[in-house]
């Protein structure tokens, strides 16, 4: 769900103080407009507490062995060729670390309502069309955030601050035009994920193995299937029926001889017709396209262009993509 570490990375592991998380990172610093034409927000998966998941999740290794954070290095330039220039591209940080993380996905959603959607600093951005992009656990955070925003929209307010937050949430939900999911376990699979991360923890020393075993994130996989089914239902109730939903699923297992971590049926569950299996990608690389021609990059770019240009159909399907 996050970026896995090799044994050589262990010396870089952080201490237990993981509180210094900057929640919002600009991936297109050339656009600082508070009145953009489009806002794209990226949500990372589970990591190991290095606090760089917001960037590493979306960093690909290309065929010529270059390391590229593609939302930062490819996307602004490619959108500009389609006359889409005024785009805010944000990547979020939140506590999803196996080493030290103790927040449930619903807690992360609530916190992001406070630190992002309700913040006056970001409120002008919600006038633009919004697209949310989530990888694995980050896709669950996307759904949790949307559900919590919807709760705020429909809540009875009792003071001016609540009313202000409600206005921000209403604007955010109204202008949410698309969600794109990479390897998201919409229908569950918690035990598979738990065993996967337990297996991965064998590369660490005994102290970090114990911290992973006691992680709140790992424990949250208990009852995971039921919780994810409920979250998907709540998400579909919260969003407009015309919301564009696209999904990418992995075609290869992470470990030789194993099965894919997120079964294709689970990855494509919410996307209806608009789901694509990336045959050469594992769960780890599903969000790391190897080139600008790869379907898990080029299709996302096309969706963003068409959302910005307002060619959305009532069916939630875009011209030229269905």
Image (spheres, rainbow, N blue to C red):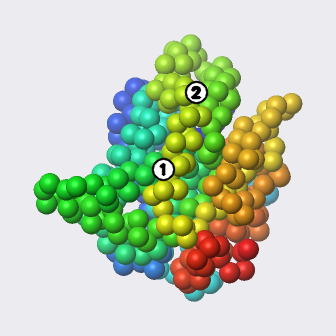
Residue 70 visible within the image = no
Residue neighbourhood size for the residue with mark 2, other residues' Cα within 10 Å, grouped as few (<14), some (14–19), many (≥20)? few
The residue lying furthest to the right in this view is 257
Which quadrant, please, contains the N terminus? top right
Q: Is residue 108 left or right of residue 124?
A: right
The residue beneath circle 1 is 234
**Residue at the image point whose x is 61% and y is 45% from the top:** 186
Decide: is 147 above or below 15. Answer: below
Which quadrant, please, contains the C terminus? bottom right
Decide: is 15 above or below 139. Answer: above
Q: Which mark is residue 56?
A: none
In depth, the one of 118 and 239 nearer the eye is 239
Residue neighbourhood size for the residue with mark 1, other residues' Cα within 10 Å, grouped as few (<14), some (14–19), many (≥20)? some
The residue lying furthest to the left in this view is 159
Q: Position of residue 305 (x, y in %)?
A: 60, 78
Q: Position of residue 155 (x, y in %)?
A: 27, 54
**Residue at the image point whose x is 83% and y is 52% from the top:** 279
The residue beneath circle 2 is 10
Q: Position of residue 47 (x, y in %)?
A: 55, 37
In depth, the one of 99 and 173 nearer the eye is 173
**Residue at the image point whose x is 61% and y is 63% from the top:** 245
């Amino acid at each position: 769900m996050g970026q896995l570490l090799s044994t050589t990375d262990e010396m870089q592991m952080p201490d237990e103080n993981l509180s210094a998380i900057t929640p919002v990172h600009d991936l297109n610093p050339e656009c600082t407009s508070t009145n953009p034409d489009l806002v794209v927000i990226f949500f990372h998966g589970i990591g190991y507490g290095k606090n760089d998941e917001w960037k590493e999740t979306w960093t690909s290794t290309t065929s010529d062995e270059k390391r590229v954070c593609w939302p930062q290095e490819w996307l602004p330039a490619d959108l500009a060729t389609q006359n889409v220039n005024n785009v805010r591209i944000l990547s979020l940080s939140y506590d999803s670390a196996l080493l030290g993380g103790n927040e449930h996905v619903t807690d992360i959603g609530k916190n992001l309502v406070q630190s992002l959607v309700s913040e006056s600093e970001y409120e002008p951005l919600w006038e633009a069309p919004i697209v949310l992009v989530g990888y694995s656990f980050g896709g669950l955070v996307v759904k949790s955030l949307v559900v919590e925003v919807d709760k705020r929209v429909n809540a009875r307010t009792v003071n001016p601050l609540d009313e202000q937050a409600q206005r921000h949430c209403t604007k955010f939900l109204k202008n949410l035009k698309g969600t794109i999911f990479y390897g998201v376990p919409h229908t569950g699979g918690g035990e598979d994920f738990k065993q996967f991360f337990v297996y991965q923890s064998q590369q660490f020393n005994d102290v970090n193995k114990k911290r992973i075993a006691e992680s709140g994130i790992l424990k949250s996989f208990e009852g995971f299937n039921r919780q994810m089914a409920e979250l998907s239902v709540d998400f579909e109730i919260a969003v407009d029926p015309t919301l564009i939903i696209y999904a990418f699923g992995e075609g290869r297992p992470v470990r030789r001889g194993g099965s894919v971590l997120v079964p294709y049926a689970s990855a494509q569950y919410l996307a209806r017709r608009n789901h694509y299996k990336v045959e050469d990608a594992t769960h780890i690389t599903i969000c790391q396209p190897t080139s600008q021609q790869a379907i898990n990059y080029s299709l996302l770019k096309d969706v963003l262009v068409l959302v910005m240009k307002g060619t959305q159909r009532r069916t939630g399907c875009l011209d030229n993509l269905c």
